[in-house]
C-alpha cells in the first residue's frame, strides 16, 4: 500500500471526486475544504448536473470537470469561460477514466452510483492511486477481477461505506493474512432497517417512492435510499464485505440497529467484540480514509451517548426484506450472480421510482432475473458487462409483461 499521508512541507494531495454532485461527493468536498493545506481538488465529475457542477467548479476551481455528453460539456465549458475559469471539460466514460488515472492525481473518491462507476474506479486502481471506494457496485460486479487488479498494482483501497469503514477500523492491521488467522469469528454488519422496519407487511405494497426515500437517519440519494428501504443496500454491502475482507458469506451477519450509532462490529474468537461508533454522518468515514493512517477534523459533532440513551438490535426478517436473502444467495453462488443481481436491482429501483412497479415487486423482478440467468464463471471484464447487459434486458422484458 502507498503511504500518502501528508507531512509538513509537502504539497497538498490532489483529489479527483467521481460523482461530485451526489451526497458522498458533496461530503467529500466539505472535508477537503476544511483542510486546504492538505488537499486540493484536481477534478470533479457530475454527469448531467451541469448547474450543480458549475457551482462546485466556481468554489473549488478544479483542473478538469467531466459530464456525460457533448451538449452538457459545451454548456458547462461556456459557463466556465464566462467566469474566467481555466477548468477543462471532458466528456463521458473516457473523461472519467482520464481524471481517475491521471498522473497528477493522488486520491480518487469513487462515488458514482451503479455500474457506471466500475471502469473509472478500475482505472484509478490500475494507476495505483489511493482509492476511496464508495461505489459498492464495482466490487459487487467484478469482485475477483477488481481484487486481482488491486494486487497487481500498488494502489491503496480504503472503504467509504460507513459499515465497511467501521469494519476496517475494527480489524487488526494484518487482517489480510486471513480472518481466522487473526482470530476473527465473524463480521457483524449493522443496518438501520430503513423507513419500513416496523411497518405492517400488508402495507408495504402500497408505499410511495417519497416514503422509501425518507430515511430516518441518513441523507442519501434516491437510488441508495430505496436500496436501504428494501435492504438491498445491505445485501450489496454483504457481497462487498466478502471481497474487501476475504470473508465467506456465512462469516458476515447482518444485524438491525435502528439508532445507526454503531456502524459495524467485529467478533473475535476470544469473546471480544470491537465496534466503531459515531454520529450518522458520512464525513466521518470520508475524513478517516482521506487522512489514513492519520486523523483529521471531519466537521462531525461528537457522539453524545448519554443523549442517545440506548442501543437496540434485532435480526432482519426475510419476509420484510427478501432482497437481503437474494443478495446472500448471489454471494454464495458467485461468478456472474452478483452482477446479475445488481443490474436487475438497478432496473427495478428505476421502475419503482418512476411508479411503474410496487415496492414489493422490486424483489420479485430481481428473483425472476436471477432464476432466468444462471450464474457463469468470470474470466474477464467483458464477462461482467455481458452478464450486466443480459440481466438488464431480462428485467425490462419482465417489466413489459406485468
Image (cartoon, rainbow, N blue to C red):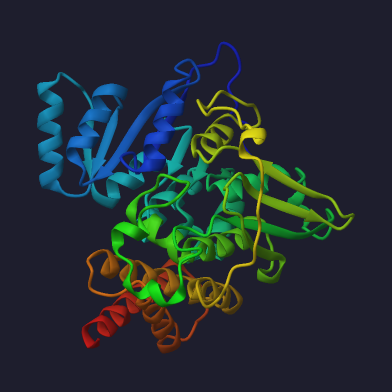
Q: Is residue 173 left or right of residue 216?
A: right
Identified at 49% across, 48% down, the residue is: 126
Can residue 378 be seen in the rendering of this structure?
no
Identified at 33% across, 67% down, the residue is: 207
Tell me if residue 68 comes above or below residue 141 in the rendering.
Answer: above
The foreground one among 159 and 229 is 229
Coordinates of residue 89 in the picture (x, y in percent)? 21, 36
Q: Quadrant of the C terminus?
A: bottom left
Q: Is residue 397 left or right of residue 340?
A: left
Q: Residue furthest top?
A: 9
Identified at 78% across, 55% down, the residue is: 267
The foreground one among 148 and 51 is 51
Coordinates of residue 373 in the picture (x, y in percent)? 42, 85
Q: Is residue 292 left or right of residue 161?
A: right
Can residue 239 be seen in the rendering of this structure?
yes
Residue 325, quarter of the rendered image:
bottom right
Identified at 64% across, 67% down, the residue is: 315
The foreground one among 253 and 339 is 253
Tell me if residue 218 comes above or below residue 224 in the rendering.
Answer: above
Tell me if residue 158 comes above or below residue 329 in the rendering.
Answer: above
Residue 247, quarter of the rendered image:
bottom right
Coordinates of residue 190 in the picture (x, y in percent)? 61, 55
Amino acid at each position: 500500500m502507498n503511504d500518502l499521508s501528508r507531512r509538513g512541507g509537502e504539497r497538498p494531495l490532489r483529489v479527483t471526486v467521481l460523482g461530485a454532485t451526489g451526497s458522498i461527493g458533496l461530503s467529500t468536498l466539505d472535508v477537503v475544504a476544511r483542510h486546504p493545506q492538505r488537499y486540493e481538488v484536481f477534478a470533479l465529475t457530475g454527469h448531467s448536473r451541469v448547474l450543480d457542477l458549475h457551482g462546485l467548479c466556481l468554489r473549488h476551481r478544479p483542473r478538469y470537470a467531466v459530464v456525460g455528453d457533448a451538449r452538457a460539456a459545451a454548456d458547462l465549458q461556456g459557463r466556465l469561460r464566462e467566469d474566467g475559469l481555466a477548468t477543462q471539460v471532458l466528456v463521458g466514460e473516457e473523461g472519467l477514466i482520464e481524471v481517475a488515472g491521471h498522473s497528477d492525481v493522488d486520491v480518487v473518491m469513487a462515488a458514482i452510483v451503479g455500474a457506471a462507476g466500475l471502469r473509472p474506479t478500475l482505472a484509478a486502481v490500475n494507476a495505483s492511486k489511493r482509492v476511496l471506494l464508495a461505489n459498492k457496485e464495482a466490487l459487487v460486479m467484478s469482485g475477483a477481477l477488481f481484487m486481482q487488479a488491486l494486487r497487481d498494482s500498488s494502489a491503496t483501497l480504503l472503504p467509504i461505506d460507513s459499515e465497511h469503514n467501521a469494519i476496517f477500523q475494527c480489524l487488526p492491521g494484518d487482517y489480510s493474512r486471513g480472518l481466522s488467522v487473526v482470530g476473527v469469528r465473524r463480521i457483524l454488519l449493522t443496518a438501520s432497517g430503513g423507513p419500513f422496519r416496523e411497518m405492517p407487511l400488508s402495507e408495504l405494497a402500497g408505499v410511495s417512492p417519497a416514503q422509501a426515500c425518507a430515511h430516518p437517519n441518513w441523507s442519501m440519494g434516491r437510488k441508495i435510499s430505496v436500496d436501504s428501504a428494501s435492504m438491498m443496500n445491505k445485501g450489496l454491502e454483504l457481497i462487498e464485505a466478502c471481497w474487501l475482507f476475504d470473508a465467506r458469506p456465512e462469516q458476515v451477519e447482518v444485524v438491525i440497529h435502528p439508532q445507526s450509532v454503531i456502524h459495524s462490529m467485529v467478533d473475535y474468537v476470544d469473546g471480544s467484540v470491537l465496534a466503531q461508533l459515531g454520529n450518522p454522518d458520512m464525513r466521518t468515514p470520508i475524513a478517516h480514509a482521506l487522512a489514513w493512517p492519520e486523523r483529521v477534523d471531519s466537521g462531525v459533532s461528537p457522539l453524545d451517548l448519554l443523549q442517545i440513551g440506548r442501543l437496540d438490535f434485532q435480526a432482519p426478517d426475510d419476509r420484510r426484506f427478501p432482497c437481503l436473502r437474494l443478495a446472500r444467495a448471489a454471494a454464495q453462488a458467485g461468478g456472474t450472480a452478483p452482477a446479475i443481481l445488481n443490474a436487475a436491482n438497478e432496473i427495478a429501483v428505476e421502475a419503482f421510482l418512476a411508479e411503474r412497479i410496487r415496492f414489493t415487486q422490486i424483489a420479485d423482478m430481481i428473483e425472476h432475473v436471477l432464476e432466468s440467468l444462471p450464474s457463469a464463471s468470470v474470466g474477464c471484464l467483458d464477462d461482467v458487462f455481458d452478464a450486466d447487459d443480459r440481466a438488464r434486458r431480462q428485467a425490462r422484458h419482465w417489466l413489459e409483461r406485468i
